[in-house]
Image (cartoon, rainbow, N blue to C red):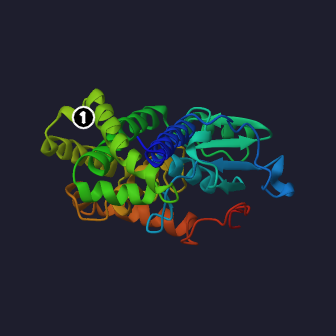
Amino acid sequence: MTLLTIALSSLGFIAILLFIRKVYQFFFPKDILHQVPDDIPSPYKDSTVVLCGGGTFIPAMRCSLSPFVAKVETYLRMSGIPFVIDTKTPIMKSPSGKMPWILYKGRVLCDSSKIIEFLKLEFPQLALPDGPVGRRIPVQRMVEDHLYWIQIVVRWTQRDDDYKDLMDKILRGVPSLMQFFLRRVLRQRVRQNVYAHGIGRMPLKLVFQQAEQDLDALSEMLGDAPYFGGDAPEHTDPIVYGCLVGLLHGLPFREYPVRKYLKTKKNLVDYVERIQDTFFSHGERIPENELYKPRK
């Protein structure tokens, strides 16, 4: 074995070790973020909600592709709570490994539902009405434990071109070698999750039929009202909007059966457009670290 062969083998081995180290740091970051980033402007640093884990911004949605991030941002906008968006901190920095999370007065809170409950306590004068628990809880379970998983099935497990579009958005900025690894690992992991949930065991036709039933129920509950809260939003509205806006305008961008059926529900389509025009009228994400102030 020549010296050149030994040298090349050693370099290859070192490159493999560095790659493994990079992947490990990606999934298991050494430092977990527990305070407001230093680059947040000082006037907002100690007393402003910082929304982290913003995920993939989709211009047509005017918010994050993640229904849970969209849910929290919509609640902040509807309630009029000033906030700052931090999109630079990666999801791996989340204490729970999920998104979104918020930073407020040195505290970190995860889980979209817990975040909203916390905001209601911290800003009672701005909190949205809860609405009847007999409507809010069943709707939340249907949207977040069923319709959400139907979105996952369509985006992650079906067509290869849909999955490629999704990964191109999600992994933007991730090193190419790591992208090669993640594109193969993530899809398999998601397929295991949807199978464990149960929805991944069903024929796709049945999955779409159940989605139509969910949309029928939401359409009937909304009726002719502008919001689920009637003339003004309530706690249920950010939950429903976070899901519907993704079904209507998110990935995949093609016309798949659930989207086609949603478009036949005029009151739900009008509902999404009403919230976009009222609370997301800027059409673009709030610039990084710029304070969002609700319209008067």
Residue shown at 71% from the left, 42% from the top: 103
In the image: residue 183, left or right of residue 45: left
Determine which residue is flagged by label 1. Answer: 199
Res 98 visible? no
Above/below status of 76 relative to 95: below
Closest to the observer, 156 or 261: 156
201 versus 129 height, above or below: above
In the image, residue 259 lies at what x, y percent? 27, 59
Q: Percent position (x, y) of residue 290?
A: 73, 63
Residue 287 relative to residue 269: left or right? right
The percent coordinates of residue 286 (x first, y second) are 64, 65
Q: Quadrant of residue 92?
A: top right
Residue at x 56%, y 54% (from the top left corner): 74
- Judge the density around disc 1: few (<14), some (14-19), many (≥20) Cα neighbours within 10 Å: some
- Which amino acid type is shown beneath numbered disc 1? Ile
- The answer to whether residue 87 is above or below residue 194 is below
Where residue 97 appears, as percent x and y from the top left, is: 54, 35
Q: Which residue is rendered at x = 34% and y = 38% of the image?
A: 190
* Residue closer to the observer: 194 or 284: 194
Is residue 186 something that shows in the picture?
yes
Residue 120 location, quadrant:
top right
Label 1 sits on a secondary structure element that is: helix
Of residues 183 and 197, the one nearer the viewer is 183
Q: Nearer the viewer, residue 100 or 281?
A: 100
Q: Judge left or right: residue 258 versus residue 246.
A: left
- The residue depicted at 50 percent of the width and 41 percent of the height is 10
- The quadrant of the image that shows the C terminus is bottom right
Q: Quadrant of the N terminus?
A: top left
